Image (tube, rainbow, N blue to C red):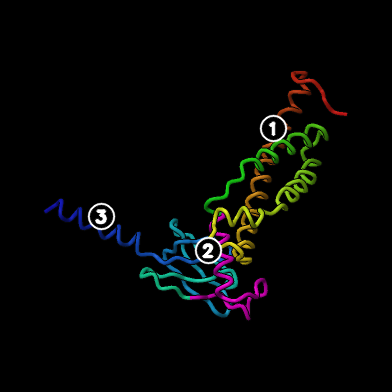
Amino acid sequence: MRYSVLILFIIINLNLSIAQDTICLVTGKKIILKEYKIDNFQRKLFYKTKKNKEKSYFLDNIFSIIDTLGTETIIYNPSTNLDFDISVENMRDFIQGASDARQTYKAPLFTMYGFVTGTAYTVLLQNPVYAILPSGGTSVLLGLPKISNKRIAKKYPEYAGNIHYVKGYNQEVKNKRFMNSVKGAGLGILTGIAAIILQQNNILPDITF
């Protein structure tokens, strides 16, 4: 009897953990919701995280809500969204591109580039504060190049020629490159500070100009 109650308890909790709605953002990010409410006056969706913290998103940042049965409710409205004015179906392609890039595209080289520039600027300028601006500028520049349409079409032939999918994919690629280079630059600046301290203690040679 005890084991039966335990098994029933596990099944109930498993169902509760699985039976949760999902919001799909226009960025391609998906968030599983514990519970939520929509405030049309503020044009926001409020939800609780797994840690029971309340967070919110503006409705303009949400494409749809998918309930536990898989039924999708479209929130996105091109007539009221100031950032996007494309149709629902084109927006769905854009989000799919961003979602695929989010899941599959990695940018470790950009972390390394950021690390190198952050370290170099800090050591050469001998001041981590002065290194922030050029390191940030480099991070922005590193994120600008796009993935070619041919490369995307080779990986996702079903979306070959779909400009909205390509835009979504490249938008997420740009975001990942930028964030990775910023993280790398931050680590590089910390490394540069350590190098400066070692230089001041004559443990490393002074390489400033």
Secondary element type, mark 2: strand
Mark 2 crowdedness (10 Å alpha carbons): few <14, some 14-19, many ≥20: few
* Amino acid identity at mark 1: Thr
Which residue corresponds to the image point at 66% horizontal and 49% vertical from the top-left?
Answer: 177
- The reply to whether dot 2 and dot 3 touch (C-beta < 8 Å) is no
- The reply to whether dot 2 and dot 1 touch (C-beta < 8 Å) is no
Mark 3 crowdedness (10 Å alpha carbons): few <14, some 14-19, many ≥20: few
Left/right placement of residue 50 relative to residue 177 reads left
In space, the residues marked 3 and 1 are separated at their CA atoms by: 48 Å
In space, the residues marked 2 and 3 are separated at their CA atoms by: 28 Å
Query: What is the span of residues highlighted in magenta in the rendered image?
Result: 74-101
Left/right placement of residue 20 relative to residue 127 reads left
* Amino acid identity at mark 3: Ile
Residue 84 part of the magenta-drawn span? yes
Residue 121 lies, with reference to residue 145, above or below; the image says above
Which residue corresponds to the image point at 50% horizontal and 63% vertical from the top-left?
Answer: 54
Residue to which mark 1 is pinned: 191
Residue 157 locus on image (x, y percent)? 54, 58
Residue to which mark 2 is pinned: 55
Residue 25 locus on image (x, y percent)? 54, 65
Task: State the image quarter where residue 169 is shown.
Answer: bottom right
Residue 17 locus on image (x, y percent)? 35, 59
Tell me which label, 2 or 1, sits earlier in the chain: 2
